[in-house]
């Protein structure tokens, strides 16, 4: 009977586990474990000088034993496993979540699902993290603040996976009932994801709401966009591209810069005059307020647009890109580093320096894919330029 209890625990655990934990959960002794090993129902997965790890001898044994358990017995074993794992400092949160869930303790399960999501997110395992956050939301109960927090985490993972529209919907859900500043940022994130994934009409509505809240607006017509672009470019030309080293951006400036950057990226490729206008306004604000991260993005965009004139623009773009790279290095933020590397490759491609652009774009692609979160637009753009460069090089 005790050997069967240990086997039940191993089957419900569904993965290798320390022999001592299995015995604690089954209230059994080493003799029960030895019986399972002798009968080829369990095996030692690995062993060390301190402990051995057990698992069912074969998946068919695990499935048969688990399927034969009555619901009440299954819940009791999950509860025993949860209790045994709770005192193990090395227990993975996703295992604890699974067993508290199986034991019917939804509240504690939701806590561990969220912790598991955080662990996977830190390792850039976006799909695994999104599953854990979804499970957490299913069990979380009535706690608006915590629901909103987990929704934001889920949206970030979905965006990192490239599911931009779904991520935008989750951000919009998180904005409902949130404090004003948080709601504005979540709405901006949703608008950014929609605009950079092709849902332009929906994005313009949300961007209009965000810009209105911070005292900005989109041009009302194509003619107005052209006039605004010319005026903004002239003002930036008069100002120059030097950052104010003594300035410090305030909270209001950060919100304005974030919204303007969303418009710049979102209008790239589909509304050029709006992009040219907003890029100039964005650059002036970033440089005037001394925001190094935004200034690096703004300067890289200036180099990107200047390089459209093709070969012969290197004398103009090179000092701008060097300054953008210097500022990005000061900030040392992965997503910003990836963006600046991507733009460096794009500029080289525009200038016809395809052999130089290819390794830069490959490096940017590797960096964005392995070090960054929430960069679906950057990844798509880098892929596009990488393919184009490869085609040009034959």
Image (cartoon, helix red, strand yellow):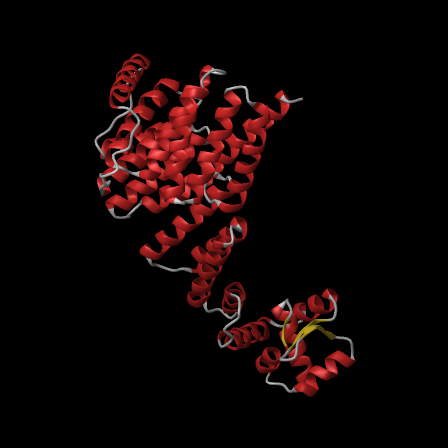
Report if residue 257 is visible in the image.
yes
Percent x, y of residue 127: 54, 49
Picture residue at 67% right of the left edge, 67% below the top:
67
Report if residue 266 is visible in the image.
no
Question: Can you tell which quarter of the image residue 336 is in?
Answer: top left
Picture residue at 75% right of the left edge, 79% below the top:
37
In the drawing, does residue 109 fall left or right of residue 17?
A: left
Percent x, y of residue 330: 37, 43
Please say if 56 is above or below 351: below
Q: Residue furthest top?
A: 223
In the drawing, does residue 202 fall left or right of residue 210?
A: right
Percent x, y of residue 300: 40, 29
Percent x, y of residue 125: 53, 51
Picture residue at 27% right of the left edge, 28% below the top:
284
Please say if 360 is above or below 20: above
Question: Can you tell which quarter of the image residue 243 is in?
Answer: top left
Please say if 31 is above or below 288: below
> Quadrant where the C terminus lies?
top right
């Amino acid at each position: 009977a005790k050997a069967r209890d240990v086997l039940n625990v191993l089957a419900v655990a569904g993965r290798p586990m320390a022999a001592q934990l299995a015995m604690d959960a089954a209230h059994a002794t080493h003799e029960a474990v030895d019986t399972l090993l002798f009968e080829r129902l369990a095996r030692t997965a690995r062993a060390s000088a301190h402990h051995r790890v057990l698992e069912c001898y074969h998946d068919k044994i695990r499935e048969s034993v688990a399927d034969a358990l009555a619901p009440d017995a299954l819940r009791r074993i999950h509860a025993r496993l949860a209790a045994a794992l709770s005192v193990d400092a090395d227990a993975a949160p996703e295992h604890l979540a699974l067993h508290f869930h199986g034991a019917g303790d939804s509240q504690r399960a939701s806590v561990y699902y969220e912790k598991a999501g955080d662990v996977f997110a830190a390792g850039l395992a976006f799909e695994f993290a999104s599953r854990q956050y979804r499970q957490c939301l299913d069990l979380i109960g009535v706690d608006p603040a915590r629901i909103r927090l987990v929704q934001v985490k889920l949206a970030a993972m979905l965006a990192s996976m490239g599911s931009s529209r779904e991520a935008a919907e989750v951000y919009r859900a998180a904005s409902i009932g949130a404090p004003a500043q948080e709601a504005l940022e979540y709405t901006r994130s949703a608008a950014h994801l929609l605009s950079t994934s092709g849902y332009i009409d929906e994005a313009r509505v949300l961007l209009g709401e965000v810009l209105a809240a911070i005292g900005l607006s989109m041009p009302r017509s194509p003619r107005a966009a052209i006039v605004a672009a010319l005026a903004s470019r002239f003002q930036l030309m008069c100002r120059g591209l030097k950052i104010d080293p003594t300035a410090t951006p305030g909270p209001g400036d950060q919100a304005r810069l974030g919204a303007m950057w969303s418009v710049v990226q979102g209008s790239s490729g589909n509304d050029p005059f709006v992009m040219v206008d907003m890029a100039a306004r964005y650059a002036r604000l970033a440089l005037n307020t001394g925001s190094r991260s935004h200034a690096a993005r703004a300067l890289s965009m200036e180099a990107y647009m200047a390089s459209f004139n093709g070969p012969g623009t290197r004398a103009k773009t090179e000092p701008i890109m060097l300054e953008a790279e210097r500022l990005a290095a000061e900030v040392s933020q992965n997503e910003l580093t990836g963006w600046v590397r991507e733009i460096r490759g794009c500029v080289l491609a525009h200038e016809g320096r395809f052999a130089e652009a290819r390794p830069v774009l490959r490096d940017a692609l590797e960096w964005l894919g392995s070090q960054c979160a929430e960069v679906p637009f950057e990844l798509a753009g880098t892929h596009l330029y990488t393919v184009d460069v490869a085609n040009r090089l034959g």
